[in-house]
Image (spheres, rainbow, N blue to C red):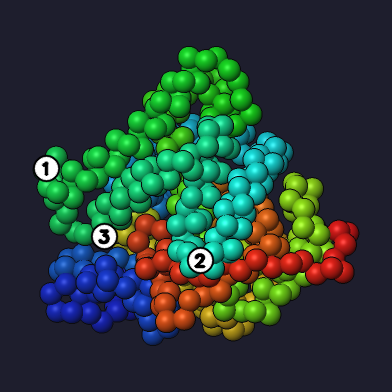
Amino acid sequence: MSKLSLPPLMPGGFLFGSGPEAVADPLALYTRAQRTLGDVVRLRGIPGINWYLVTHPAGVEHVLKTRGKNYRKPDRFNAPVRMLAGNGILAAEGDTWLQNRRLMQPAFHRQRLAGLVAQMAQAAELAAERWDRLAAEGAVVEVGEEMLRLTLRIVGTTLFSHDLSGEANVLGTAIRTAFQHVSMRMTMPFAPPAWLPTRENRRFAAARDVVHRTVDDMIAERRRSGQERPDLLQMLLDARDAETGARMDDRQVRHEALTLMIAGHETAAASLSWTWHLLSGNPGAAAKLREELDAVLGGRTPGVEDLPRLPYTRAVFDETLRLYPPAWGQPRESVEEDEIGGYRIPARNIVMVSQWVTHRRPDLWDRPDAFVPERFVGAGPGTFPPFAYYPFGGGARQCIGSSFALMEAQVVLATLAQRFELESVPGHEVVPDATFTLRPRNGVRMRIRRRTPSPAAVPA
């Protein structure tokens, strides 16, 4: 295998190669690399440091699934995540990850998640009441902040049976501050050590303490009360390994609960923000969405039984995830030397697969940069090549919360889109910010308008 050639090298600066652009604008860099040099590309950082971009579905499948054991999450990813969320399933490796995943998997069985839909709908109804007031005032809102408040309420009630939305200013700010620090440590090659009392390190430590204290207090209260509740925290506390009978201790419960709270709050809010932005710019798709909601729901709150009857609503979110996947790229580190696409991949090198690039490849998608939800209506196995579309990753480490996220998005869109129209504010530029989560830089400023469902709409 060592006789194989390395992939073509992306041109870059003399001293730092492509490193500065990978930090400043990775989406543009990786898109240009694929369009210029093909399916497997080598990029250079400082002298002696290379990493590899893989964007063809067959190569992505090789990295994430077929040879997944040869590609671990790199320490540059795991170490900053562990600073915030401990050794939960997001950052754990090997046997620890496998045991934790087995313990958590039953909590995310589709039938169990279905029981949480009513709580999601209740949270969306409370958001609708707030939007009623804002619409009456003709208010312009930052939709990202609105979605963060809503997803924090949903993750609080479904995970802890506790409404966290009242703590959105403190807890939400703490989560975002901590995320920014984690992202900085992933991308900056010479970040100061965590023990150094720099201003940035102190800000992160304070934010982390707020998040940890919130979760620890709720776990301790559950233990003290002895009450069992139908939420994800209870499922974590009750979880047993089917093979060993082992349970999680409180420290591990904290790590997994933190992972679910942080990821479920931030990524869902970012994706829903992009959805409202795309609907505003595509009035035909927005009208088709409202037509489906009027016909099926007729103004009422959706229940779990309604979700299969809302295929276009689901397709709107699927298409959002294609264009703006919250996990826009996933780094891996090769354990042993390997071959991808006819090229040699050396051992102990970073391999990046990028949803952003693969989801927008012109050879895979018709009108790749256009918002076309119809492409997902009726889509099933075999509609697209495997790993042409993988917003939740793939292989053994596919996101455990994918079904939760899809249910949540349908409930939120179905509840709010049938009652409100969101109109983009002219002159406000919305661009992607590719940090830990693909968020809209500078937010999404929109005006909320109340709408009246079609009088001809009769629930089917």
Name the residue type under label 1.
Pro
Q: Rounded to the nearest whole Å, what is the CA distance between mark 2 and mark 3?
A: 37 Å
Q: Position of residue 424 (x, y in %)?
A: 51, 75
Taking the spot 49% from the left edge, 43% from the top edge, the residue there is: 165
Residue assigned mark 3? 187
Residue assigned mark 2? 139
Q: Quadrant of the C terminus?
A: bottom right
Taking the spot 43% from the left edge, 20% from the top edge, the residue there is: 220
Image depth: mark 1 or mark 3 in front: 1
Q: Position of residue 76 (x, y in %)?
A: 28, 51
Name the residue type under label 3.
Thr
Q: Nearer the viewer, residue 224 or 124?
A: 124
Mark 3 nearby-residue class (10 Å; few <14, some 14–19, many ≥20): some
Is residue 127 something that shows in the picture?
yes
Q: Earlier in the sequence, mark 2 or mark 1?
A: 2
Is residue 241 something that shows in the picture?
no
Image depth: mark 2 or mark 3 in front: 2
